[in-house]
Image (spheres, rainbow, N blue to C red):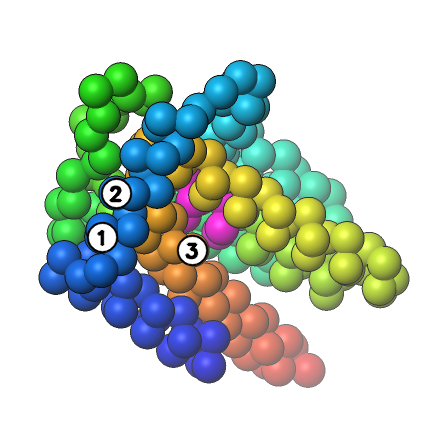
């Protein structure tokens, strides 16, 4: 509940600032223009690779691989959480995009051109939901602290790389990816809490 409240509050503040054209929107434009002007190889190719890996098609592959692993491990409640968290988070993101209808960054020579809305970032939402859930599962399922720490570092790094790639390529503003992370953390808190409550109730009835 604390995590849900904090992440929800962060998203609310970001949304109000963006829609109210607060100071963060000026920072958004400056950062977007700087990256567009200073993009260089091989960094640009790496960012393209990261962003394409976490497109809808890429996420479906990653989702299928994690679902296959959870099924093999008999982690049916985590499998159920995965089914709600990632697809549900992506659908929530689409709804929020159409609610806020923020235009994407505009450049004379864009690296990517997209017709959809900008706030919040869909790629960042999917990555945060996916890697966030994977981190929660492995931290609980693996007793070794080295594995737990390595998992958290890896998952956090991947989320930040995806978010950075979207800003670097000019697909989103900084506030778009920050809002996406906040939105996804709140959604993950709801999903994991709901599945955990369901598991406890079912196990309680069995006992």
- Determine the image quadrant of residue 202: bottom right
- Mark before the other along the chain sequence, 2 or 3: 2
Q: Is residue 137 above or below residue 52?
A: below
Q: Left or right of 135: which side holds 102?
A: left
Kind of element beneath mark 3: helix
Q: Left or right of 143: which side holds 78?
A: left
Q: Which residue is rendered at x = 54% and y = 40% of the image?
A: 161
Q: Main secondary structure of the magenta part?
A: helix
Q: CA distance from mark 2 to mark 1?
A: 6 Å
Kind of element beneath mark 1: helix
Residue range of the region highlighted in magenta in the rendering: 123-129
Q: CA distance from mark 2 to mark 3?
A: 20 Å
User: Which of the pair 53/39 is nearer the observer?
Assistant: 39
Kind of element beneath mark 2: helix
Question: What quarter of the picture does the C terminus occupy?
Answer: bottom right
Frontmost of labels 2 and 3 is 2
**Residue at image mark 3:** 181
Q: Position of residue 134 (x, y in %)?
A: 62, 52
Frontmost of labels 1 and 3 is 1
Q: Position of residue 143 (x, y in %)?
A: 84, 64
**Residue at image mark 2:** 29
- Mark before the other along the chain sequence, 1 or 3: 1
**Residue at image mark 1:** 25
Q: Position of residue 71 (x, y in %)?
A: 67, 45
User: Which of the pair 36/156 is nearer the observer?
Assistant: 36
Q: Which residue is rendered at x = 45% and y = 80% of the image?
A: 1
């Amino acid at each position: 509940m604390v995590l849900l409240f904090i992440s929800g509050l962060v998203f609310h503040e970001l949304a109000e600032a963006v829609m109210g054209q607060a100071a963060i929107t000026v920072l958004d434009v400056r950062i977007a223009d700087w990256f567009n002007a200073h993009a260089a190889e091989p960094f640009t190719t790496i960012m393209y690779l990261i962003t394409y890996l976490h497109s809808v098609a890429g996420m479906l592959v990653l989702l299928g691989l994690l679902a296959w692993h959870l099924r093999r491990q008999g982690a049916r409640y985590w499998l159920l959480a995965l089914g709600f968290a990632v697809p549900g988070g992506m659908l929530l993101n689409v709804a929020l995009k159409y609610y806020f209808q923020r235009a994407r960054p505009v450049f004379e020579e864009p690296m990517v051109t997209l017709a959809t809305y900008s706030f919040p970032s869909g790629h960042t939402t999917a990555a945060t939901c996916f890697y966030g859930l994977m981190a929660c599962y492995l931290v609980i399922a693996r007793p070794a602290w080295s594995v737990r720490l390595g998992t958290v570092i890896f998952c956090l790094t991947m989320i930040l790389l995806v978010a950075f790639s979207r800003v670097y390529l000019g697909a989103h503003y900084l506030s778009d990816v920050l809002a996406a992370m906040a939105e996804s953390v709140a959604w993950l808190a709801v999903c994991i809490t709901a599945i955990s409550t369901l598991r406890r109730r079912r196990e309680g009835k069995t006992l």
